[in-house]
Amino acid sequence: MKLVFRQALQHRSTKPALWLLCLLPFVWLVWGTANDALGANPAEYLIRATGDWTLRLLCVTLAVTPLRVMLGLPELAKLRRMLGLFAYFYVVLHLLCYSWLDMGFEWGDIAADIAKRPFILVGFSAFVLLTPLALTSFNRAIRWLGPKRWQWLHRLVYMVAVLAVLHFFWMRAGKSNFAEVFVYASVLFALLAWRVIHSSVWGRLSRSVGFTR
Amino acid sequence: MRFNQFSKGSDSGFVHPLSSEITPHAVYNERRDWLKQMAAGAAGLSMATWASREAFAQTPSEAVLRPGKLAPLTGAVSRVSGANTMEKITTYVDASSYNNFYEFGTDKSDPAKYAHTLQTKPWTVEVEGLVKKPARFDLDALLKLSPMEERIYRLRCVEGWSMVIPWVGYSLAELIKRVEPLGSAKYVEFITQADPKTMPGVRSRVLDWPYVEGLRMDEAMHPLTLLSFGMYGEVLPNQNGAPVRLVVPWKYGFKSAKSLVKIRFVEKQPINSWGRSAPQEYGFYSNVNPNVNHPRWSQATERRIGEDGLFAKKRKTLMFNGYESQVGQLYAGMDLSKLY
């Protein structure tokens, strides 16, 4: 069974297929906008949907390593960069929709909004922190930075994910509507907790006595 | 409660005069003749519809097309100042599918999906508290209490979007006069339906149920404050607060409580549901005010649903949602940045 999985992951059409899959929400949003299928308030729909997809892709990206280790599927690692870049793609769209549809590209108003409103500031910080990760996502960047430094830089993604959920929490806080926030927070918590446990002394010990997977 | 028939016609547009600039009678008559001429066909069709609405204020306006979904409920065009904006009316589809009605879920598409379970018959509204004549009205009695009027109001949601909706109902003041409030009654509290069996959202703990709203006595008595039973010439769809709701056009939408079951006259300012849930975000007054921002977004602009294009700039929000000339005096001397 596992072998079938590994072969499927290695297949040359896997990456393009995943690429198309990640692009589907975008295609739907473009189609929906053109065909007036996004409900009574398409601007709000676009801003929220691009935010939702950023969060989802962040979670999926962060799930790659735990799944790779737990399921013993090293091939999964090859898909991580694309997923991460799609998270960045959707956050750029999110910021674009906000700046355009909500703020009409009034740069002064946008700057004031970021400075004045914690929930916008937190979201914007997450975007800013994710940017160097996207910019150094290609192989040569690893060589330039050195793997250690590169890895350190890319650990920023944990902070980005926490900020993103906080941004979402704050957005929903005024309306006491936390059901979805709770789902994302739980997924994120599980993914980060796994890393803590996995890298802990206990994790290292268990591996040293031949508990490898 | 001033009922100013002379200012009507001139102040139902975008720019409202101060009460000191009320149209003189002669000018008013001249305008009325002009409107009648226009209605008679001298002007284009769309203008004529508006004009006839203004000139023959006895029949329901032709601008409002009945969607043909629910039982008809029509009213004569209201003579209350400010009650007939001539702005483009939001489509019925948008007005009945994009709703905040947390008793049916937190998503704005939830009410239209789930509100069909709401039982609106039989329905009674209890009026109690500091009144001489407390009463229990069944819906039929309420429907007959005063003649129905059609009122076309702007609706501004605290979330930054707006609509223009033709409501059917009468001034809440009509009901208030019947029950004869005592001098000690300073506020009116509105309690809405909260039935976990028919309202799935009530099972969640998003808010404390039932949903409660409140108005100061003079706000409740203001002729613009509407007890509404219908919209677009038909009875209210469940998702819009059937069978009877409040519409307070100069306040953010959440002040206009839906599916009313109890109206209580009290001495102390009631704590409204959103005020209880997030007092730093939602005040008791919640008057539409472009100068007082919500902590998480600006209230200076709004998007008119179905009208302002996706990439169009949002329109400026008007003080008291454009009803300043009618209601501004209610708040004279109050610091609206503190009493938001």
Image (cartoon, helix red, strand yellow):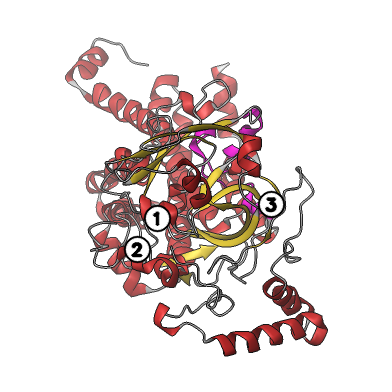
Looking at this view, is B244 or B164 the one in front?
A: B244
Name the N-terminal-most of marks 2 and 3. 3
Q: Residue furthest left?
A: A201
Circle 3 Cα neighbour tier, 10 Å, few/some/many (<14 / 14–19 / ≥20):
few
Q: Nearer the viewer, mark 1 or mark 3?
A: 1
Mark 2–mark 1 Cα distance, whole angstroms, equals 7 Å
B112 left or right of B214 in image: right
Which amino acid is tagged 2?
A: Leu
Q: Position of residue A196 (x, y in %)?
A: 24, 26
In the drawing, what numbered circle is on residue B93?
Answer: 3
Does the segment drawn in magenta span residue B243? no
Left or right: B250 as drawn, with respect to B166: left
The chain identifier of the residue carrying mark 3 reads B
Residue range of the region highlighted in magenta in the rendering: B92-118
Asked whether residue B110 is drawn in magenta, I would say: yes
Whole-percent x, y for residue B318 in the image: 43, 70
Q: Secondary structure at mark 1?
A: helix
Amino acid type, residue under disc 3 in the picture: Val
In this orientation, does residue A82 appear?
Answer: no
Instruction: Report in which chain the residue with disc 2 lies.
Output: B
The residue at which mark 2 appears reads as: B330
Q: Quadrant of the C terminus of chain B?
A: bottom left
Residue type marked 1: Glu
1 and 3 marks on the same chain: yes
Residue ID for mark 1: B219
Mark in the foreground, 2 or 3 = 2
Vertical side of A190 occupied by B173: above or below: below
> Could you say whether the residue bearing mark 3 is in a helix, strand or loop?
helix
- Left or right: residue B313 compared with residue B284: right
